[in-house]
Amino acid sequence: MTKFIFVTGGVVSGLGKGITAASLGRLLKQRGLKVAAQKLDPYINVDPGTMSPFQHGEVFVTDDGAETDLDLGHYERFIDEDLTKFSNLTAGKVYWNVLNRERTGGYLGQTVQVIPHITGEIKNFIYSGAEKSGADVLITEIGGTVGDIESQPFLEAARQIYLEKGHDNCLFIHVTLVPYLKGSNEHKSKPTQHSVKELRSMGISPNIIVARADEPFDESIKAKISLFCNVKPDCVIQNITLPCIYEAPLVLHENGLDEVVCRELGITTEKPDLTEWKELIYRIRSREKEVTIAIVGKYVRFHDAYLSIIESLNHAGFDKGTMVKIKWIESETVTEQNVGEKLNDVSGIIVPGGFGDRGIEGKITACRYARENNIPYLGICLGMQIAVIEFARNVCGLKGAHSTEFNIDSPHPVIALMEEQIGITQKGGTMRLGAYPCKTREGSKIRLLYGRELISERHRHRYEFNNAYRKIITDNGLKICGTSPDDSLVEAVELPSNDFFIGVQYHPEFKSRPNKPHPLFIGLVDAALAYQQREKLNKAN
């Protein structure tokens, strides 16, 4: 029987519920348990696919094509398990399903209410996640902060599951803030007490409290939280601010989180084997080299919009003993006049995915600068399309070459709407989404990096390389190094004349793990280090 763990948050948002849930998942996995994770989001959007990255951050895509919250990226990176459409649920999706069922007579004339119909839909999703995954433990994070009106149906559903499954099979972890007041020179437990009081008013008593603080606090604070929040003393777990999020599993283990979770749920396991994770942390702390890579995009003011790319660069850096510093470049500000000034101190350039025409010419200019100066370049999704547009204009002589996404009247639409996307008007969940196979070309750099012919990567796009321009572009030197198995879709391009110039239609960042870095990011960091060394030698001479 699956054990259910619910992770809630109190006092303020941004405390790291997702990191706590992901870290616990890793610890339980290292104890030999099969673990699955879910995120329940209280917003009314059906999914985050149409939300602005400035508001929500990146949209994480699963193998089966679900557009999900970015916390699922943390779950996959920490737990190293591929999640599914049963891993993310929004209030919008809940109401959508319930209302559609009501319209088709699914409730047989009943008055549809929050209880039992909305809560029932949420419970069915949670139970389906447990069933489909076959997990020993299902960790479900409830988004938002206790007290938010939007979260109430999710908390009520969790309360009902606790009642149905019993205390031996269900556990609540409450992540809360213990602030330090400089004026009084002490930590304060009162916000935690009030947060737990709010949670208990909804019929939920937390079994474990994960207390977030910037600095360690005294045992007296733990004792006070234990007493006034009615939890066992060893169920108050300190979780202090760390220099690297990947240290969290080890710190939480040292503070006994996985031990008390297993005890409270009646789970008997061996001690967790954390050798691999400890080696990872050692590599992170032992990095001696440093390299700077630019990310040229339209959402750079909000770094969470590119969270998986940031982490993928970090993962490659861990592997190469290198601290990867990111230079954030707002693409709208890049011109032919200032591109050299903006990019002359970087050793690699990434143009990430995105939508809309704002900043497109700046991205094209940055791509040209990378190509002409042999600076390692990785174009992801739109970044690949940018590489094709730039090459078509400036090497192939196709004046006005563009994507029909940005210029429907382009004389040379080298990037065009995918055939299956023609006529689709709805925005949400209608793109080419999820994992698709890709065949890499023998002798290409991408084949060398992956080490195999057939790969699988995740996609999120509507536009593609226009096959009508394959010949002229490849004849001029930009090679197609990855296609769909039937050769109908171009999935990757590279420029053999450069040390590293690769564009991929897919999103490799979604499959990188801290202990299994993605080969394309390893290749980019390797190339950036080589470029940096070469530039140092040139300046010395």
Image (spheres, grey):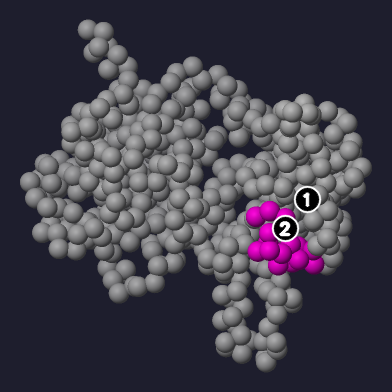
Outermost residue toward the top? 541
| Disc 2 residue type (three-letter) | Gly
Q: Residue 458 location, x and y as percent?
A: 43, 53
Marking on residue 147: 2
Marking on residue 150: none
Main secondary-structure element of the magenta-colored stretch: helix
CA distance separating discs 2 and 1: 8 Å
- Residue at horizontal 13 percent and vertical 46 percent from the top: 393
Q: Secondary structure at mark 2?
A: loop
Quadrant in which the N terminus appears? bottom right
Outermost residue toward the front? 183
State the residue in front, 310 or 479: 310
The correct choice, above or below, for 139 with respect to 124 in the image is above
Q: Do the numbered discs 2 and 1 sit on residues whose CB atoms are within 8 Å?
A: yes
The residue labelled by disc 1 is 195
Q: Secondary structure at mark 1?
A: helix
Q: Is residue 492 visible?
A: no
Q: Is residue 421 visible?
A: yes
Left or right: residue 187 versus residue 401 is right
- Residue at horizontal 46 percent and vertical 31 percent from the top: 316
- Residue at horizontal 15 percent and vertical 40 percent from the top: 477
Give, as a single range, the part of the protein colored magenta: 144-160
State the residue in front, 291 or 200: 200
| Disc 1 residue type (three-letter) | Ser
Q: Specify whether residue 145 is painted magenta.
A: yes
Q: Residue 146 location, x and y as percent?
A: 72, 55
Q: Earlier in the sequence, mark 2 or mark 1?
A: 2
